[in-house]
Image: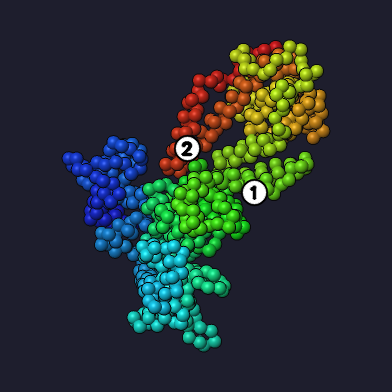
Amino acid sequence: MASFSPQFLDEIRTRISVSSVVGRRVKLIRKGREYVGLSPFSNEKSPSFTVSDEKGFYHCFSTQEHGDIFTFMMKTQNLTFPEAVERLAEEAGLEMPRQTREEVEQAQRGNELRETVEAACGIFEQMLHAPEGARALAYLKGRGLSDATIKRFRLGYAPSGNVVKTKLLARGMAEAPMLETRMLSPGKDGRESFDFFRDRVIFPICDARGRPVAFGGRIMGEGEPKYLNSPDTPLFHKGQMLYGLDLARNAAADKREIIIAEGYMDVIALAQAGFTHAVAPLGTALTELQLELLWRMAPEPTLCFDGDKAGRAAALRAAERALPMLKPGYSLRFALLPPGKDPDDICRNAGPEAMAELLAAAIPLSDVVWRQLVGEHPIDTPERRAALERDASAKASQIADGTVQTQYARLFRERLFELFRPSKAAPGKNRGFPSKNRPKGYESPRLSTAPINRALPPDSHGQRRVRERILLATLLNHPEISEHVEERLGSMAFSDVRLDSLRQTAVIHIAQNSELDFAGLQAHLANRGFGDELANLLDSGIYVHAGFARPSAPVDQAIAGWDHTFALCHGAELEADLKRAEIELAENPSEQAFATFKALQDQSRAGAGEDDDGLDNDTH
């Protein structure tokens, strides 16, 4: 990150008042020595936002946002600190500090390159409205673009021949920066350099400040390549930039939303239809740097790629790229377009309302990953189901953030359970014991408030392991409660890997076998290699902590005990999530980290009324 002296920052603060910066986005009313207005950070109706020029800061009482002119620019325009400083320094009429001779030379070289690209952009714009550009202008009009949209995106035309080179040289510009920015291609075998773009509609690519740094050119008739883009240059790195970002960032900041389309025309068509918060990658798959840039503007950007095979493939590539980078509150959503349609088609032919409906129906990244997994795996044999289960687990493990990885693993387990379970039994049919095998006095599962069992070991990890064993032992000794517990048991993740494998195997076997008994379930698990685990689970030692798990315990007590133990396990998981969120907030304080911590804290407090000291009374 760039370093700025306190004196330089103070000079900017002296020249530019907080109220002048804030007043561009908030209607301020003078109140004594301060200003008040409606908060730009919340949808409030009564003003709770204050600005003090005397003290040099703003404060929002509804959201606790607080800062100076730099933080306000960063928050409302999605700028980095150096970007905010640079913009405000320019406004204040101050030169950015250059600390070394090399930095000074680099800045001068950068200015020369930008002047070259800006001059070329102006030539392209002029040529679009010259007689030579009539066909290009007709093409853009035929795509439904208005004069205002053409002007806003600075669209142009690159004529045949060497018009750009000739005009730039006539202005006294040197050929070297033209070659370095690839306005010109170097000639081969001693030939002269020539215009890089010829007879193409031109789409300027601008940096975050709206300065053109590169171009994309589209052919109007037949031929390849359809699109020709500037290669990487000192000003332009396509994997680090997004088309239309300079025009979209304010709208994205206001909406806390951003759309990622596939190409130039999609972004332009979306903007003309009112979706001014749209951007596009530059001829490559979405990169890690672009994802980080998007997440600075919105927590869940929406990918809106074409509904053809290539568009679906691009969406899957983006999902794969994003998966390891996911963090609490930050993901992607996917708007699925009809086959053969792109945003440009929909906006022009079906209208903005249809586009808005597609965006509103966007599905989360987790659904895209799940659909891909299921689409790659038939599940007609146990081995193929096992392969799907293995690959789902491996997919979740790609996520670096522990909290998000846990949630994905839990989601996949729930969906595997639903996918593998047979259709619901007909009314009146019991999915536990067949009626002839039901224990005497058996009734349909119901909750009970009877005292259940005695306290568990004091350490939290030991408690969790014992509780997990209790849950399985109770089910193994009372298969008749399977319908009551299987969905919750299927959504869990046990701390012991072998025990977790036994849990998954048991749940899947129960879901696929409506005629189930104690001996059959144990035999199946033993045949799958869980003999030792079964012996330990059904050892009498477990019953010291949970008398309801005994084979001889009444069914209603087994159900009540299982429910209570599950609630305690769930509470322990919540506490672990809360601890991780607390650590994340301490190490990386942010609005999102605080929101995650607060939500988990509220859940924890809501469940504080439950008994979490273990289970109290042994029922023999």
Sort mark 1 into few (<14), some (14-19) or many (20+) by Cα contacts within 10 Å: few
Image x and y of residue 305, in percent: 54, 55
Residue 173, located in which quarter of the rendered image?
bottom left
**Amino acid type, callout 1:** Gln
Q: Nearer the viewer, residue 481 or 477?
A: 481
Q: Earlier in the sequence, mark 2 or mark 1?
A: 1
Which quadrant is the N terminus positioned in?
A: bottom left
The outermost residue toward the front is 349
Residue 372: numbered disc = 1
For the residues labelled 2 and 1, the Cα–Cα distance comes to 28 Å
**Which numbered marker is on residue 596?**
2
Q: Which quarter of the picture shows residue 429?
A: top right
Q: State the residue lying farthest toward the bottom.
A: 190
Residue 539, how many percent across, how many down? 75, 22
Q: Residue drawn 32% across and 58% down?
A: 87
Q: Position of residue 403 (x, y in %)?
A: 55, 39
- Answer above or below: position of 361 versus 82: above
Q: Secondary structure at mark 1?
A: helix
Who is closer to the viewer here, 585 or 503? 503
Q: The residue tagged with tag 2: helix, strand or loop?
A: helix
Residue 587 in sight from this viewpoint: yes
The residue located at (35%, 42%) in the rendering is 41
Q: Which mark is residue 537?
A: none
Residue type at mark 2 is: Thr
Q: Quadrant of the C terminus?
A: top right
Drawn side of residue 512 relative to residue 414, left or right: right
Residue 523 placement (x, y as % from top left): 82, 28
Is residue 187 placed above or below 582 in the rendered structure?
A: below
